[in-house]
Image (cartoon, rainbow, N blue to C red):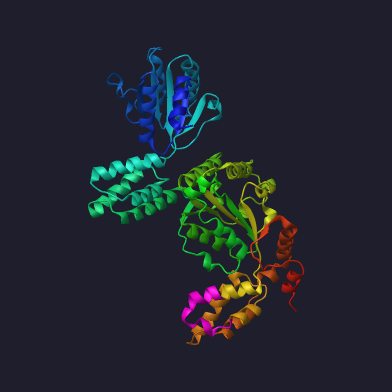
Amino acid sequence: MSFTTELTLCLRARYPIIYITTQEEERAEQAIIDCAKQTGNRGVYFWDFVDGYQGNPTDAGIARRNPLQALEHIEKLPAATATVFVLRDFQKFWDDIGVSRKLRQLARQLKSQPKNLILLAPQVSVPEELSEVVTVLTFALPDVATIRAELERLLNASGSSLQERELDELTRSCQGLSIERIRRIIARGIATHGRFQPSDIELVLEEKRQTIRQTQILEFYPAKERISDIGGLDNLKDWLLRRGNAFSDRARQYGLPHPRGLLLVGIQGTGKSLTAKAIAHHWHLPLLRLDVGRLFAGLVGESESRTRQTIQIAEALAPCVLWIDEIDKAFAGMESRGDSGTTSRVLGTFITWLAEKTSPVFVVSTANNIQALPPEMLRRGRFDEIFFVGLPSQEERQAIFSVHLSRLRAYNLQSYDLSRLAYETPNFSGAEIEQTLVEAMHIGFSQNRDFTTDDILEAASQMIPLARTAQDQVEALQAWAASGRARLASRSHGLGDHLKERLNPE
C-alpha cells in the first residue's frame, strides 16, 4: 500500500494522532496537503516551535514557542470544521506531563470530529503512555518513478539533455537519495559545466557516501577486488558466477527471486572478507559495510531504532551488497548479556528482515566461530547458502601464491617456484601466505635485491600458522563442516583423514 493511500485511509477513518517519520519534511508536507484535498478538501495548518501556526492568516504566529498552547488551539476550532494539523518536531515535547496528558485528551475528542493531528519527525519515538493513541506511518524515500520525473523536470529546466540510457543510469544511481539531495547533485553539475553532463553521474556516488557517512553505522566501501583475485574456492566462485545476472529485469521476467545472501563460515584469513568485496565488484553493485557493534547505543530503544534505520537505508540503496563482517562477535553470548534484552531484540529485527525481505539487498555475513551464532540465524531461508571456507589445499595455495606474485612481480613471475612454495606451506591460510610474501620482501629489500623463492621459504619457516596455534578450534570447525551443515567452498578441500595429514604432516 502506498503512503498516499495509507494516509488517506487514516484521515477518512478519523485516526486522531498520526506520527509520520521522514527525512524529507518538505515533500511529506506536500503529500499531506494532497491527501487532505482528496478527503473533503480539508484545511491544513502547520505549526513549529519557532514560528507557531502557519496556513491561516487569522491564526498566524499563534502558539509560538508554546507546544501546550498549540494543542489547546486545536480545541478552539469548531468541531465540524474538517482540518489537518501538522506539528513539526513535536516529539521533543512529549516528556512534558502537560503535553502528554493533553495529547491523550485530544485523542478522545478527535475521534468524533473530522480533524486529524499529524506529527512529523525524522525517527520513531513514541512514549509508552501514547502508544495506544498514536498511529505510525513511514514516508519512504522517493521511488524510481518519482526520481525519474524529478530528474526530467530538472534537466528540462536547466536546458540539459541526456540519452535514454544515461537517464536510466542516473535514475538508478539516485535511488536511496532524497529529492533535496538529488536537486543538489543536478545543481552542482550545472554549476560546474553550465549544464548537467553524463560524467556528472559520478557526483551521485559521492552524495551517497555522504549520506551513509552521516549514519555512523554503515560505511560505503570501495570494492576493487575481482573474482580472479580469489585463489581457490572454486565451488563458491561457480555459485556466484551463476548468479551474475540475477538482479536484472530479465531474471524477474523469468520468475527468479532476488538472491538473498550468503553466510561464509570458516577459519580466519581464508578469504571470506575478500569474497564479499569481489561479489560487489563482479556484480557492479555498491558495497555497504555494517559494523554491528555500532548498532548498540546507550539509550533505551536507540539500538532497535538504529537497526531499522540501517535496514531502511540498505533497502533504499538497493540493489546493493550489505557486508556484515564477523557477525558472530556481535551476537555471541546473548544469554549472559545484561542489556535488558536489547541484543535479542536487535537480532530478532535483523533475522526477521533476512527472512522476509523482498528488496534486492544481497547480504554477505562472515563468521569465524559458528558455535557463537544463534541457531535461528542458520535456519534455511535467512541466506541462500552457507559456505564453509577452510584452509586451502596445496593446489589452492599455489593459486594464492600466483595471485599475489602476479600483483607484486608480474614481470618476474616465472622465476618463482610456485609448486614448491605451495608444498612447503601446509596449513597456511591465504592471509598467512600474503604476510609471508611481505616478510620475504623485507628480507630482499634489506639486502638491496629482489626477493626470491628462498626468501619466501625462509619467511614461511619462521611463521607458525593459526592451524597449529589454534588446532582445537580449527578441528572443531572442520568437524562441523564435515557433518554436512554447510557447503564446501572448495572442490579440492578434503576432510577427515586429509585434515589430519595436513595438520600433522610429519
Residue at 59 percent of width and 58 percent of height: 239
Q: Nearer the viewer, residue 372 or 207?
A: 207
Number of numbered discs: 0
Q: Residue furthest right?
A: 497
**Magenta: predominant secondary structure element?**
helix
Q: Quadrant of the C terminus?
A: bottom right
Q: Is residue 147 left or right of residue 404?
A: left
Q: Is residue 249 above or below residue 102?
A: below
**Residue under the image location 37 percent in, 48 percent down:** 168
Whether residue 59 is visible to the viewer of this picture, yes or no, is: yes
Q: Quadrant of residue 270 in the image?
A: bottom right
Q: Residue furthest front?
A: 254
Q: Is residue 65 visible?
A: no
On the picture, is 380 further left or further right than 439? Answer: right
- Examine the image and state in which quarter residue 78 appears: top left
Where 438 falls versus 349 (above or below)? below
Note whether 353 is above or below 193 in the view shown: above
Q: Residue 303: image x %, image y %?
A: 55, 43
Residue 257 is situated, as x and y percent measured from the top left of the image, at 55, 46
Q: Please state which of residues 113 and 241 is positioned toward the viewer in this rendering.
A: 241
Q: Nearer the viewer, residue 96 or 49?
A: 49
Magenta-span inclusion, residue 256: no
Question: Residue 355 lies in what quarter of the image?
Answer: top right
Which residue range is magenta in the image? 402-417
| Residue 28 at x, y percent in the picture | 39, 33
Q: At which x and y percent is residue 352?
A: 60, 42
Is 41 displayed left or right of 476 in the figure? left
Task: Write the residue at 35% across / 31% down.
Answer: 30
In this picture, is 25 found above or below 10? below
